[in-house]
Amino acid sequence: MPRTIIEKLWDAHVVHQQPGAPALLFIDLHLVHEVTSPQAFQGLRERGLKVRRPDLTIATADHSIPTSDRSLPIVDEIAARQLAQLETNCAEFGIRCLGVHSDRQGIVHVIGPELGLTQPGMTVTCGDSHTATHGAFGALAFGIGTSEVENVLATQCLLQRPSKSFRVEVNGRLRPGVSAKDIILALIAGIGVGGGTGSVFEFTGSAIRGLSMEERMTVCNMSIEGGARAGLIAPDDTTFEYLAGRPHAPKGAAWDAAVSRWRQLPTDEGAAYDRSVTIDADALEPMITYGTNPGMGMSIGATLPDPAALADPMQRESVSKALAYMGLEGGKPLAGHAIDVVFIGSCTNSRISDLRAAAAMLRGRKVSPNVRVMVVPGSQEVKRQAIAEGLPEVFRAAGCEWREPGCSMCIAMNGDQLSPGQYAVSTSNRNFEGRQGKGGRTFLASPLTAAASAITGVVTDARTML
Amino acid sequence: MTPFTNFESRVVPLPLNNVDTDQIIPARFLKTTSKQGLDKQLFCDWRYDAQGNPKPEFILNQPRAAGAQVLLAGDNFGCGSSREHAPWALTQFGFRAVLSTSFADIFKQNSLKNSLLPIVIPVDVQAELFAAVEADPAAVVKIDLASQTLTTPSGRAVEFPIDAFSKHCLLEGVDELGYILNQESAIKAYEQSHPAGIDALAG
């Protein structure tokens, strides 16, 4: 019976299946960060339990960590306590912690892949909904809550029910100025933020095959924004080339054996999916969101939806409420709308290729005097690479802030945030009310769109500036 | 986990689709290392003005919300972030069930682990309930988990779906970790036949 990669990953990790109960699934890699783990460690303490597999667990500090000078003390005492608690918990339970002062610190979904910890065929969990990022390697990777973080720490297992399979086939070639971010924003705009609920996306098709690993991570990263439990891409030579030589990747004969195992992962010819959609990459345009969830997106040149034209009263109310929060008027264009802040960063778009794309647009140009531009690399490793390529000079010369690695203004827990009413073009993943600061208004877009808009000071189609 | 018992309650209507967990509890409150003290932060930015005063027009600040244990929402409740702080805040406010036509996967799993029952209802029942509680804010629904029945204010009994395992855990107050720990021999056998591909402690 032909199987999808989703079924193969599932079957290979079922530890036990009792009748009438969910399957017990083994987790190959568990990523831990400061925000969703303290209560889980406390739970272990209360029950007198240990971390079962410290060798499959790694921690870092990303969500509440400041992106200002790391040699200075952390001003926010509550954040400082939480960050210190992570170090204490990791030391007590024997977990490796790439903490505040580690030269490997970074956003959890950036460091897993760059260290070679994330590998094809794995199950990966983290107390963070953007764990689907790791699916780019052909792994089944999904976000979990703190109770489940505790379960994985204690047993390396989770109780899970199989998800439906949802194929997203993207064929053709992206045109200049259109990026991986636009693929996923277009998908979510098409199916809605609940469209993938109960499913795992498998991204297939020639356009996906043509993406680099970093671009694939951008696509998989936002699977949760389409409601999916996870999103993944079958591994191929692009995957293996990215992984080869990374610190935790297999070496020598073990590498060859791993690659031949990984080559068995792709979906079998004739395997059935529960649902499929197709996207024509050639027809894609740069996307931007206008509303208060990631499904409220459109081509950058389109006009805003008019709530009065919507038939469903609940949907009318949602769009109308979103436009009111955003201070926008239905039927008008969004391009040309003034902005206050540009954020280039987050687990969606903070990797070296994202920074290169933004720098290419900003080189030799100045950002608008009305716009604050924050560039936040995803990890210390990304930062080092950017420095080696001279990118911080490009950003600084253009008038951008070059900051220390972390989640930063994607989740706005660390002091990097919008003021009430401010508009941002952001390369992150969520435009929920207040997500980037109470009262702040977010337009999600690609690094290229963000950089172009930074220069003009208004929402801008980057294709006019290539 | 406390066993889930039958109850009847007034209903707090929140007629919005896609209510995300950033609204249920904003991220700036996630710097806590405790599970407690989150009830005041529930829907904080909809509930309080810039000075921290309750906004009288928001439903949780109205007398009908006091003591109510059921939240009635639009479609796709709980989307977005995986934060378990969302069900912690909801239960600490006093909610024991949320009614919606659909729930985001992670929110649903997190709720089940905290004795917060996510009840999926058909669109027509959702519409009936919104109308009923608008007409009479004191209208009550009854929730019986054992028989998987939601009884609307008009007396209509609606069966709701829940998987047998989650139902058992809720009714008996069984937590998943205890259940998984009992599978020790199966876990050990799996580990022995599947050598680890990485050693995160190395390097």
Image (cartoon, coloured by chain):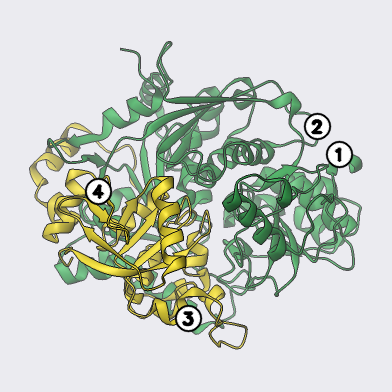
Chain colours: A green, B yellow
Residue at position x 27%, y 47% in the image:
B160
Q: As drawn, is A191 to the left or to the right of A197?
A: right
Number of numbered discs: 4
> Which is in the foreground here, disc 3 or disc 2?
3
- Left or right: residue A387 versus residue A71 is right
Mark pair 4, 3: CA separation: 42 Å
Disc 2, SS: loop
What is the crowding at mark 3: few (fewer than 14 residues within 10 Å), some, or many (at least 20)? some
Query: Label 4: which residue?
Result: A156
Marks 4 and 2 on same chain: yes
Q: Same chain for the residues at labels 1 and 3, yes or no?
A: no
Q: Relative to A35, is A195 above or below?
A: above
- Crowd around label 4: few <14 · some 14–19 · many ≥20 (10 Å): many
Q: How many angstroms separate mark 1 from mark 4 (CA)?
A: 47 Å
Same subunit under labels 1 and 2? yes
Provide the residue designation for mark 3.
Answer: B61
Residue A463: mark in rendering: 1
- Whole-number angstrom distance, CA of label 3 to CA of label 2: 51 Å
Chain of residue at mark 3: B
Q: Nearer the viewer, mark 4 or mark 3?
A: 3
User: Where does the N terminus of chain A fall, quadrant-wise?
Assistant: top left
Judging from the image, mark 2 belongs to the subunit labelled A
